[in-house]
């Protein structure tokens, strides 16, 4: 929606920004308390919106105000995690809140804030952090029903709980590592994170065919071509691709560069031209960008103060025959066999342990890759 001078129309919400006034058309019955807040005619702040119910209406209004420059940009995913934790803890019984509150604030939130300082804190990361808190609450509920508490939990308790919650192995480890480290519980064998080796790859001919479609097929949507090419050339997760802003692309001496990790990477000319066309098209199509304090997203959502939805992009890629997982695994294996692990780690922004894991899988001669392909045949 495009901010415009306020007129005496029903259903319009007036907000202030310096000496300017803006209105946002809000259908009756949709925005509720959010619209009433905007109608006060005061300067809206993040804190004021934080006091409302954090539903889709509030989120959309906030994003629109950020887009228009009325509200400052903030790491909204992290802010929403903070609000969610506070609301979750407030609903817990006192005996559970005394454990969940410090665990969530001193462990989960502390780690999330550290990641946000290093770079974008993604929606996927927030989902995993919420899941860790939810699992901790489930475990305390289970202990209450078993007439036990966290201080008296034993290995036998843990193993019985895992028998009925086998998919929560990794999440319960977050809580128990924290309680053991602080002496809240005795020594426990903390469940190890389940690490499965990648098993889905593309044959070389199919890999090249899909990459060729991304670079050359003008019948495909431009944004899907760029995402598909970045995945197949640099093994970048879709979550990271969608978080990219336009300032990560630069052109120097007729060559295009994209900063993927910490360093600019020289792009093939065709991909550089596609990204330039995408940036030009986005600029012409949108009145607003991500906000005055942040460069525009390369793949903006609606409103453009947030990136596109990961799920929607994955569905679209599958529909046009460019599935993501197989292609990314293949691209990663190709990169790790052609370059040393430390180079891949620095170039693509991977954690060193991740690059090392792929090096062990590749074994420098594609043996594992060929074995997987044979099993698929």
Image: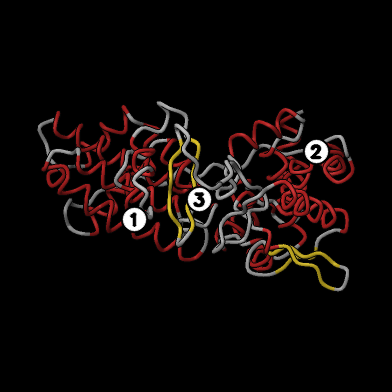
Q: Is residue 141 above or below residue 361?
A: above
Q: CA distance from mark 3 to mark 2?
A: 31 Å
Cβ–Cβ below 8 Å for labels 3 and 2? no
- Which residue appears at 27% of the width and 32% of the height? 161
Q: Does residue 193 appear in this view? A: yes
Q: Counting residues from the N terminus, which is met first, the one under dot 3 or under dot 2?
A: 3
Q: Which residue in the structure is indicated by mark 1?
A: 109
Is residue 185 rendered to the left or right of residue 193? left
Residue found at the far bottom of this picture: 253
Find out whether the residues at labels 1 and 2 contact each other: C-beta distance under 8 Å: no
Q: Residues within 10 Å of mark 1 (few under 14, many from 20)?
A: some
**Disc 1/disc 3 C-alpha distance (Å):** 14 Å
**How far from the left and from the top, in percent, is residue 357?**
59, 55
Residue at 89% from the left image edge and 43% from the top image edge: 216
Query: In this view of the protein, can residue 366 be seen by the observer?
Result: no
Q: State the mark number for residue 122.
A: 3
Task: List the residue tagged with mark 2.
Answer: 203
For the N terminus, give its image quadrant.
top right
In this orientation, which residue lies closer to the viewer: 358 or 351?
351
Instruction: Kindly indicate whether the residue at mark 3 contacts the one at mark 1 (C-beta within 8 angstroms).
Output: no
Element on which disc 3 rests: loop
C-alpha separation, residue under disc 1 versus residue under disc 2: 42 Å
Which residue is found at the position 43% from the left and 27% from the top?
28
Of badges 1 and 2, the one in the foreground is: 1
């Amino acid at each position: 929606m495009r901010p415009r001078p306020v007129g005496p129309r029903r259903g319009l919400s007036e907000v202030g920004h310096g000496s300017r006034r803006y209105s946002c058309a809000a259908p009756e019955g949709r925005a509720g308390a959010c619209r009433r807040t905007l109608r006060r005619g005061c300067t809206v702040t993040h804190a004021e919106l934080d006091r409302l119910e954090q539903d889709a209406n509030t989120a959309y209004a906030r994003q629109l105000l950020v887009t228009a420059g009325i509200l400052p940009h903030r790491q909204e995913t992290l802010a929403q995690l903070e609000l969610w934790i506070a609301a979750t803890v407030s609903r817990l019984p006192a005996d559970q809140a005394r454990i969940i509150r410090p665990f969530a604030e001193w462990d989960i939130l502390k780690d999330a804030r550290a990641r946000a300082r290093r770079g974008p804190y993604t929606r996927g990361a927030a989902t995993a952090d919420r899941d860790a808190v939810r699992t901790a609450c489930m475990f305390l509920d289970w202990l209450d029903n078993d007439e036990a508490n966290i201080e008296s939990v034993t290995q036998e308790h843990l193993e019985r709980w895992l028998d009925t919650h086998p998919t929560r192995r990794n999440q319960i480890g977050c809580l128990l590592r924290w309680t053991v480290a602080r002496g809240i519980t005795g020594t426990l064998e903390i469940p190890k994170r389940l690490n499965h080796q990648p098993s889905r790859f593309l044959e070389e001919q199919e890999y090249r065919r899909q990459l060729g479609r991304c670079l050359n097929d003008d019948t495909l949507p431009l944004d899907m071509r760029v995402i598909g090419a970045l995945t197949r050339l640099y093994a970048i997760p879709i979550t990271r691709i969608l978080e990219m802003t336009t300032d990560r692309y630069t052109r120097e001496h007729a060559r295009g560069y994209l900063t993927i990790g910490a360093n600019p990477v020289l792009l093939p000319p065709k991909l550089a031209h596609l990204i330039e066309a995408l940036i030009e098209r986005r600029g012409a199509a949108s009145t607003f960008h991500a906000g005055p304090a942040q460069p525009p997203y390369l793949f903006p959502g609606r409103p453009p103060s947030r990136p596109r939805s990961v799920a929607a992009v994955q569905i679209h890629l599958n529909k046009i025959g460019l599935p993501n997982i197989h292609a990314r695994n293949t691209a990663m294996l190709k990169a790790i066999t052609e370059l040393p692990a430390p180079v891949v780690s620095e170039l693509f922004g991977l954690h060193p342990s991740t690059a090392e894991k792929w090096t062990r899988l590749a074994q420098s001669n594609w043996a594992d890759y060929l074995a997987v392909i044979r099993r698929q045949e």
